[in-house]
Amino acid sequence: MFLRQITDSSLAQNAYLIGCQKTGEAVIVDPERDIDRYLKIAAENDLRITAVADTHIHADYLSGARELVERHGATAYLSAEGGPDWQFEWGKGNPNVHFLHDGDIFKVGNIELKAVLSPGHTPEHMSFLVTDIGGGASEPMGLLSGDFIFVGDVGRPDLLESAAGFAGVMEPSARTLYQSLRETSRLSEHLQILPAHGAGSACGKALGALPISVMGYERLNNHALREALTGSEDDFVQEILSGQPEPPRYFARMKRDNRLGPALLPGGELPEPRRLSPKDLSSLVGDRKRVILDLRTDRLDFMSRHVTGSLFAPLAGGKLSVVAGSYIDEGTPIILFVNAAEEVNEAVRQLIRIGYDQIEGWIPVREALAFGDIITCQKSILTSDLADALSAHPNAAVLDVRGAGEFAKGHVKGATNIAHTRLAARFGEVPSASPLYVHCGSGQRASLAVPYLASKGCDVIYVDGAFANISDSIRSDS
């Protein structure tokens, strides 16, 4: 048996390529939309992808399942569970799509995958037990756990309400997850846990950085799993629903598109944005129909000098996906300011994975900054100076873009709290005061939020530095 974990570090997402080396057949589980890299790895190992499976209707990226079915003739295996609102509508009536119920089995060569209904994160969620029959195994070696069990955590049950807008389902989903986790007590200690996400994903709050784990180890060290196996249902529900990070706005759209069917990439290829010249920018800057994403890493460099109206969206660390997915409406044309031409392909991949296909062009940042008449700087202060600034501007307001849990533990008196990932969704709640001081816990999240607010016409001042450096005289700590 061939098994390869293929990780997208920007979304902390894992797909799994599993192949039978005897027959040359392979299945890809939980693939993203840019499937060329999976096909390449398969070919390099004398395998062909004949099957694809999704553990559930994903919220954080567009699935590549439809692309593989429609363009490459793969057979898709998708959940038929979860009720009428949680079906893969795009697959209905397609002869290359097989719908699975709990306990159903399909094979890829001499590899057996058994569907295990594991609802809670979503109603239709399935995990897959993998058995290497060709290798002589009589019991599973691993569990493709999707967003059910992670290393160090379990899938969050609140997204249907907090991201997709299904009111009143958060607590029932948490109780369903509790029961699903208790069902894992029948699984073997040696079973490998092969999760769909790792540390940095917004699909949980305490995901570990290790790529895989073992069931026995998780029973001992995964707090949420241990709580479900040994604690009360009410305690588990309270614990799992507290402290979850606020999801980016685009999560709701991913749910919709993965259910109805992600748009196929034109010709099955990645978009190829054109190389812009500095003169091209004069007609683009200030055009509210377009968004400029500046991929620089240094936030102070951006704040000191950037093109008017551009958003700060560092390519590294998954920040590009967060900025685009939180602040840009679907269908919006995008211009990229890159550090080097080599970044364009990676930026395009990150954007199309979350449904931003209209990438019109790119230009090196240094060339864009050569035109002085379209350049601006962002007014900034340090957190240690915030108290004096507010004293000098009594009509000013403070916007705290940390998470609600952080805000509850301590905040600036009178501040408004909206997580940076939810600003566009809750823009009507942003204080209209002038100036508006924006801070977070370290300066990083505020550096993403401030350019967005400035592009919307807010008289905003960036507050950089650690929250701990804000004077006690203006803080209200719990």
Image (cartoon, rainbow, N blue to C red):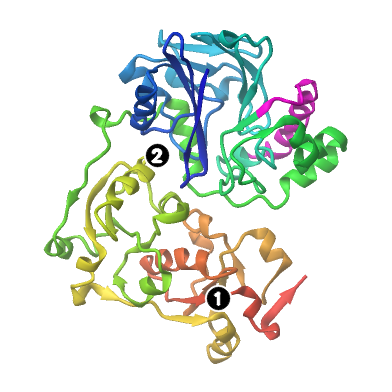
Asked if one can make out residue 414 in the rendered structure from this viewpoint, the answer is no
x and y, in percent, of residue 26 in the image: 45, 17
- Badge 1 marks a residue whose secondary structure is loop
Other residues around mark 1 within 10 Å, as few (<14) / some (14–19) / many (≥20)? some
Side of 120 relative to 227 (left or right): left
The span picked out in magenta is 167-192
Q: Tell me the kind of residue under disc 1.
A: Gly
What is the x, y in percent for residue 427? Answer: 48, 60
What numbered label is drawn on residue 465?
Answer: 1
- Residue 320 visible to an observer of this rendering: yes
Query: Measured from the top left, where is residue 473 in percent x and y?
Result: 70, 86
The answer to whether 122 is drawn above or below residue 19 in the figure is below
- In terms of depth relative to the viewer, which is nearer, 369 or 403? 369
Q: Marks 1 and 2, how far apart in space? A: 32 Å
Residue topped by disc 2: 353
Q: Secondary structure at mark 2?
A: loop
User: How many numbered marks are there?
Assistant: 2
- Please name the residue shown 46% across and 56% down the image: 424
Quick one: label 1 or label 2, which is nearer the N terminus? 2
Q: Amino acid at mark 2?
A: Arg
Residue 173 is one of the magenta-drawn residues: yes
Left or right: where 32 falls relative to 470: left
* Circle 2 Cα neighbour tier, 10 Å, few/some/many (<14 / 14–19 / ≥20): many
Quadrant in the picture for residue 47: top left
Image quarter where the C terminus lies is: bottom right
Residue 361 covered by magenta stretch: no
